[in-house]
Amino acid sequence: MSVPLLLTILAGGATFVGAIFGVLGQKPSNRVLAFALGFAAGIMLLISLMEMLPAALHAEGMSPVLGYGMFMLGLLGYFAMDRLLPHQHPQDLMAVNRRPTNLKRTAILLTLGISLHNFPEGIATFVTASSDMELGLGIALAVAIHNIPEGLAVAGPMYAATGSKAKALFWACLSGMAEILGGIIAFLLLGPAVSPVMIAAIMAAVAGIMVALSVDELMPLAREIDPHNNPSYGVLCGMTVMGLSLTLLQTSGVG
């Protein structure tokens, strides 16, 4: 098994960790979840704008028109897909006045929405790690962090609606499997013989997707989960930690 595919599987598997929190023990506080979402957004933003997009633009044979065009395509593609998806957020799902049947239906809709969001993330993780393992590790870390509250958001309401831990874990893991499926499809379609221009173009589009995901989904959701704290703190911490780690790797000659 290739290392990029393994990273994709591990990132998608983090959904299961969130699902465990949803059915066992004490779930993380809203403050912790919101900070984690902001932290993941910070990692994605820094890697996308400071590493992935510049690397794509400076790849051999890549023109600025194609590079920025693919970046915009990633942005617009994300927002186009986002408009088609059902939107149910964790705080809506946890509303105590919902009947169990409605709660179950809403949790299933959330699973569908998260799965469709996760699919391109799996492609992003695999493609990035295939081109640059250092960046791939960063993207995999960010994806894994924000998959934990997603798993919790699916498993908690499903457990409340059905009383079955097995069903709650199943539906939560289903959303994580979509990410792994994206990585597997990228692995099968791209293969080892891909031109540098194609990899660069895909990386530029992935950078657009990651920026859109951070700004449109992760940061607003962090604010909604914990309206009393500023999600920017998590974003800045994520950027700082990722920036320092990349600097240390580069100065040590790794990557």
Image (cartoon, grey):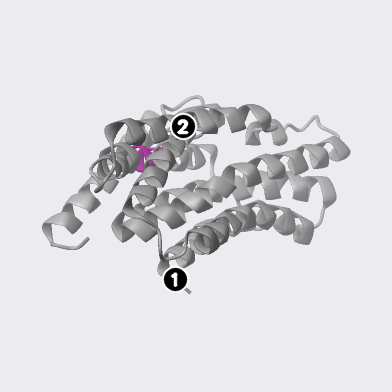
Q: Residue at x 64, y 32 (%)?
A: 91
Distance from Cα at disc 2 to Cα at disc 1: 28 Å
Q: Is residue 44 magenta?
A: yes
N-term-proximal mark, 2 vs 1? 1
Whether residue 87 is visible: no
Q: Give the residue at the far bottom of this rendering.
A: 1
Q: Amino acid at mark 2?
A: Leu
Q: Position of residue 165 (x, y in %)?
A: 76, 59
Q: Is residue 101 magenta?
A: no
Q: What residue does disc 2 label?
A: 73
Describe residue 218's horizontal placement relative to residue 113 as left or right. Answer: left
Q: Amino acid at mark 1?
A: Ser
Give the overall secondary structure of the magenta segment: helix
Closest to the observer, 15 or 5: 5
Q: Position of residue 108 (x, y in %)?
A: 76, 43
Q: Residue at x 78, y 57 (%)?
A: 167
Check the image and report above or below for 180 versus 118: below
Describe residue 238's horizontal placement relative to residue 28 as left or right. Answer: left
Quarter of the figure with residue 61:
top left
Q: Position of residue 113 (x, y in %)?
A: 67, 39
Q: Position of residue 65 (x, y in %)?
A: 32, 30
Q: What residue does disc 1 label?
A: 2
Describe residue 123's horizontal placement relative to residue 207 as left or right. Answer: right
Q: Secondary structure at mark 1?
A: loop
Q: Residue at x 76, y 47 (%)?
A: 158
Q: Residue at x 37, y 29 (%)?
A: 232
In the image, the segment drawn in magenta is 41-45
Check the image and report above or below for 138 versus 47: below
Check if mark 2's residue and mark 1's residue have beta carbons within 8 Å: no
